[in-house]
Amino acid sequence: MQHLQGTSYFIEIGDITQSSLETYIAKHYQQAKIVIIVDENTHDFCLEYLLTSFDCLKDAEVILLPAGEENKVMEVCFQVWEALTEYGIGRNDLILNLGGGVVTDMGGFIASVYKRGVDFIHIPTSLLGMVDASIGGKTGIDLGVYKNQLGVFNHPKAIFIDPIFLATLPDDEKRNGYAEMLKHGLIADKGHWERIKDKTVEQITIQDIADSVGIKFSIVEQDPNEKNSRKTLNFGHTIGHAIEGYLLEREPISHGYAVAMGMLVEAGISLDEQKITEIEFDEIKSVICKNFKQIAFEKEEIAIIVAIMRNDKKNELNKINFSLLNKIGSCEINCFFEGKQLIQKFNYLN
Ligand SMILES: NC(=O)c1ccc[n+]([C@@H]2O[C@H](COP(=O)([O-])OP(=O)(O)OC[C@H]3O[C@@H](n4cnc5c(N)ncnc54)[C@H](O)[C@@H]3O)[C@@H](O)[C@H]2O)c1
């Protein structure tokens, strides 16, 4: 069992049945009611394992969310808050979020706002949830085409990461997490990039997952409120989020695929700005193109995507804020561009 201790929470990586979940609940929530939030898939594939592994969860209430990013919206939150009220959940009770990034983002938000905050624990079940979404205290939901437009920073009390849940996760979903693992290598750790760049998703090991968790954890611990170094995690996301948001109401694509496209274009911008070499760019491009399908957008679509970026949370003084690579394994924050400078950069997707 690998253990990471943060300032306000801890992470355990390994067999959850050997983790401290049971003793932690016995110590802090003996009298508490427990609610487990799942989506349709984690209900079918993950819940039984959890319930049969832990006696302390036998009386837990289960709240079922519809699966998918299109359901990471306020309407669904309202229903959950109503259910929590019906179950008589109070401030001293506990919410367990068992699912991918949608469940942990939305479950964390629901818990943070309900009665001004109820404790919650994340048990991520997707690769993306394990290496990224569950860590760092960003909770939230989407508003129309704007990703994570509503939310709060609030950490879970604990995160339990057990790769056993990945057994039922489709490979395509695993690739979403792989995109974020590649990002962690690109922005902060060349060794991690080297170790995973030629792997298939089936070849990812628990140590690769732990390494990625460690990178994200140390970045967010240093800069929890995203004033400085945490912005490096946005590499690929300024464009990736805008693409994901644009397609949300048309033909949704998953987060990791959008981020992979975002990383390709933003690596292209890094090249144009002479921050990385052509050799580095070609290496990044070949890894991304091998694993992630690209979409070529029409001119009018690019204009809409750039317009979405103009509303990005990270912007300052009407300029769009990017985190760009300096080299493989290092990232520079606060690189500002005008929207019109970005249109032709989408050529990197072709
Ligand atoms: N808070 C953050 O810092 C942060 C970081 C990155 C991404 N995110 C968010 O995370 C979300 C994407 O996360 P995701 O890719 O996990 O999406 P997701 O939660 O929608 O999960 C993907 C799919 O896999 C299913 N699934 C999950 N675990 C499973 C399992 N063990 N077996 C079978 N099916 C399973 C889900 O039901 C869903 O259909 C986005 O909303 C993104 O904005 C948040």
Image: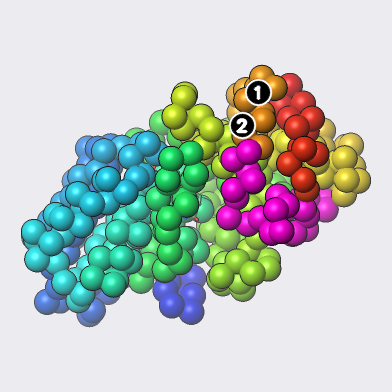
In space, the residues marked 2 and 1 are separated at their CA atoms by 7 Å
In the depicted structure, whether residue 254 falls above or below residue 219: above
Between 219 and 212, the one lying in front of the other is 219
Quarter the C terminus occupies: top right
Split into quadrants, the picture shows ligand 1 in the one at: top left
Residue 289 percent location from the top left of the image = 68, 27
Query: Which amino acid is tagged 2?
Result: Ile
Give the image location of residue 124, x and y in percent.
38, 52
Q: Residue at x 47, y 24 (%)?
A: 251
Q: Residue at x 89, y 37 (%)?
A: 278
Q: Secondary structure at mark 1?
A: helix
Q: Are marks 2 and 1 in contact (CB under 8 Å)?
A: yes
Q: Is residue 45 positioned above or below 190 on the image?
A: above
Left/right of residue 71 with respect to residue 299 in the rendered view: left
Does 312 lie within the magenta span? yes
Specify the quadrant of the image occupied by residue 331: bottom right
Q: Name the amino acid type tagged 1.
A: Glu
Residue at 31 percent across and 55 percent down: it is 107
Q: Please check the rendered image and state whether residue 233 is part of the magenta-colored stretch, yes or no.
A: no
Residue where numbered disc 1 is placed? 300
Residue 47 seen in this snapshot? no
The residue lying toward the viewer, choosing from 41 and 273, is: 273
Spot occupied by residue 122 in the image (x, y as percentages of width and height): 35, 59
Q: Position of residue 184 (x, y in %)?
A: 64, 52
Q: Which residue is mark 2?
A: 304
Q: Is residue 192 left or right of residue 217?
A: right
Segment colored magenta:
307-336
